[in-house]
């Protein structure tokens, strides 16, 4: 479903990724972990064309998106949804308008069809009766859930989560975990960037550990949990950055 | 070598190249996307309201003050030489050709340019611009083009209003302070001012709209890190668009002068 080959990215003189390769199978949830500034979000942003790699390939369903122009990325962006760390909700729009945004842009649905879809979606995310609120009136957890609900409005095949539980209380963290697991059960392919290891262990099938611009380790979650001496174990226990 | 490369002159030159390159790329994207659907008429109308209607009080105050001050100064200056009767002629031509378009554009640059840069900059910082892209839409079409079009539509209308109000301000002072007959004042304006005078000033406002909207959107879009840069972008937007209006005014005056000679 997703294949990253020899991904290289730098900002100015600063090299972020020297050579990163990994793949994600259909229906799988891959975790991307690593220290702050390791470039996890850069990879995630590149998977939807928000950043362009210096070299390498990013294949989504066999199509190399690294070379596509902005207008050619529209079809990819309908297929791959991005859940931003802070929600990235449009603050001049209500919750309803935020959720209606992708529908208005990419579908021919009428107002009542849209309303019914949005009300159902909000209900599923525990946000019933919040459609008239503006993002500024929502708590951090609600904003993240609205962001996730908006990302899923177009029924994407892949979801990219950028630290979906960062800064949330245990209740909201659990809620987000449940949503990710529910989507996974429905066959959704996903990549999760996180520092929240309990969430990563709860929802991921495999994980990649980024260090010094390369993938230092990739394997199943069970392998990481069983390993008591490796570099990932040290990272998780705060002994390595 | 590194010392030379880091010298203020080289850094300034580098910044200028970067700025004009960025403006060039943004202008190309605007022209490329301007005639391609989807078209966001509703967003453009909202911006016309924001740029036009909301700037109106500021423009009214600026225009009436300018007209009144000019009338007073010309009147006091020319009175010594018995030339008070030339006040309507001087005020109206100066307003229509220069002061109306330039002052209105500077006010719009300050109010609207700052607004564009800070609003777009904040959207960049809060990842809303990224969200627009991630949701399969174009920030150029959704954010930039409606603002550029709105300024292009609103500024000439504001300039036309400003011209009228400035002349009214001149008339008020001409009547109250210089004791000129209002009918004489209006008649003098109508017999002196030609359509060429009017359009040589009014025509500039379309260019000034571009000089204000494009750099302001550019500075907003190029905000990188944090709210501090939003403030810097806002300042740059006002300074650069004001400079472009003032410098551009000279070259446009020259251009219109050449065109007048040709016709």
Image (spheres, coloured by chain):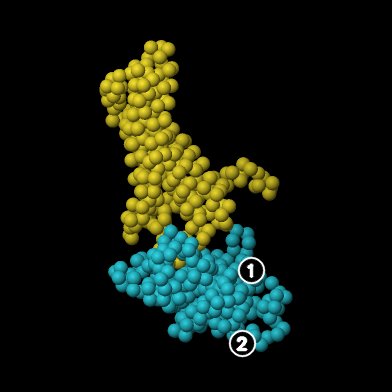
In the rendered picture, chain A carries what hue? cyan
Task: Judge whether B182 appears above or below B202 on screen.
Answer: above
Q: Is residue A38 left or right of residue B236?
A: right
Tell me which corner region of the image, top left, top right, bottom left or bottom right, holds residue B55. top left
Q: Is residue A108 left or right of residue B211?
A: left
| Residue at the (51%, 81%) spot, across then down | A178
| Residue at the (63%, 61%) spot, across then down | A14
Which label's residue is closer to the chain start, 2 or 1?
A: 1
How far is the residue under mark 2 from the one under mark 1? 24 Å
Q: Can residue B73 be seen in the rendering of this structure?
A: yes
Which percent across, then down, holds residue A83? 49, 71
Write down the residue under mark 1.
A36
B157 or A143, nearer to the observer? A143
Write down the residue under mark 2.
A222
Secondary structure at badge 1 equals loop
In the rendered picture, chain B carries what hue? yellow
């Amino acid at each position: 479903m997703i294949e990253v080959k020899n991904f290289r990215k730098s900002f100015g003189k600063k090299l972020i990724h020297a050579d990163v390769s990994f793949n994600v199978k259909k229906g799988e949830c891959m975790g991307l972990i690593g220290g702050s500034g390791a470039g996890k979000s850069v990879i995630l942003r590149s998977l939807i064309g928000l950043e362009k790699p210096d070299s390498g390939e990013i294949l989504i369903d066999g199509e190399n998106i690294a070379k596509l122009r902005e207008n050619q990325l529209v079809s990819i962006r309908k297929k791959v949804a991005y859940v931003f760390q802070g929600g990235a909700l449009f603050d001049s729009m209500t919750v309803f308008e935020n959720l209606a945004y992708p529908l208005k842009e990419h579908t021919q649905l009428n107002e009542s069809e849209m309303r019914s879809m949005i009300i159902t979606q909000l209900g599923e995310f525990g946000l019933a009766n919040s459609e008239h609120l503006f993002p500024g009136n929502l708590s951090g957890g609600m904003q993240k859930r609205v962001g996730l609900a908006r990302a899923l409005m177009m029924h994407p095949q892949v979801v990219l989560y950028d630290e979906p539980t960062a800064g949330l209380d245990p209740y909201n963290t659990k809620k987000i975990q449940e949503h990710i697991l529910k989507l996974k059960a429905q066959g959704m392919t996903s990549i999760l960037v996180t520092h929240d290891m309990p969430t990563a262990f709860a929802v991921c099938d495999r994980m990649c550990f980024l260090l010094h611009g390369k993938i230092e380790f990739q394997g199943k979650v069970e392998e990481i949990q069983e390993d008591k001496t490796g570099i990932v174990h040290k990272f998780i226990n705060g002994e390595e950055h | 070598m590194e010392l030379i490369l880091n010298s203020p002159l080289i850094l300034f030159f580098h910044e200028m190249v970067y700025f004009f390159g960025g403006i060039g790329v943004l202008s190309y994207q605007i022209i490329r996307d301007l005639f391609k659907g989807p078209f966001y008429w509703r967003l453009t109308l909202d911006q016309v309201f924001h740029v036009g209607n909301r700037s109106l009080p500021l423009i009214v105050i600026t225009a009436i003050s300018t007209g009144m001050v000019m009338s007073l100064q010309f009147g006091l200056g020319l009175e010594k030489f018995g030339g008070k009767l030339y006040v309507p002629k001087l005020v109206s031509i100066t307003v229509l050709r220069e002061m109306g378009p330039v002052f209105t554009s500077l006010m719009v640059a300050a109010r609207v340019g700052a607004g564009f840069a800070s609003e777009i900059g904040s959207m960049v910082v809060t990842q809303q611009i990224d969200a627009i892209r991630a949701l399969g839409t174009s920030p150029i079409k959704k954010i930039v083009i409606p603002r550029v079009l709105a300024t292009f539509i609103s500024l000439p209308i504001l300039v036309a209003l400003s011209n009228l109000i400035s002349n009214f301000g001149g008339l008020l002072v001409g009547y109250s302070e210089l004791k000129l007959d209002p009918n004489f004042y209006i008649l003098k304006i109508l017999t002196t001012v030609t359509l060429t005078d009017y359009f040589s000033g009014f025509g500039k406002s379309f260019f000034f709209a571009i000089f204000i909207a494009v750099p302001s959107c550019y500075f907003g879009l190029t905000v990188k890190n944090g709210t501090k840069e939003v403030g810097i972008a806002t300042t740059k937007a006002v300074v650069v668009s004001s400079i472009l209006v003032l410098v551009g005014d000279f070259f446009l005056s020259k251009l219109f002068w050449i065109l007048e000679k040709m016709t």
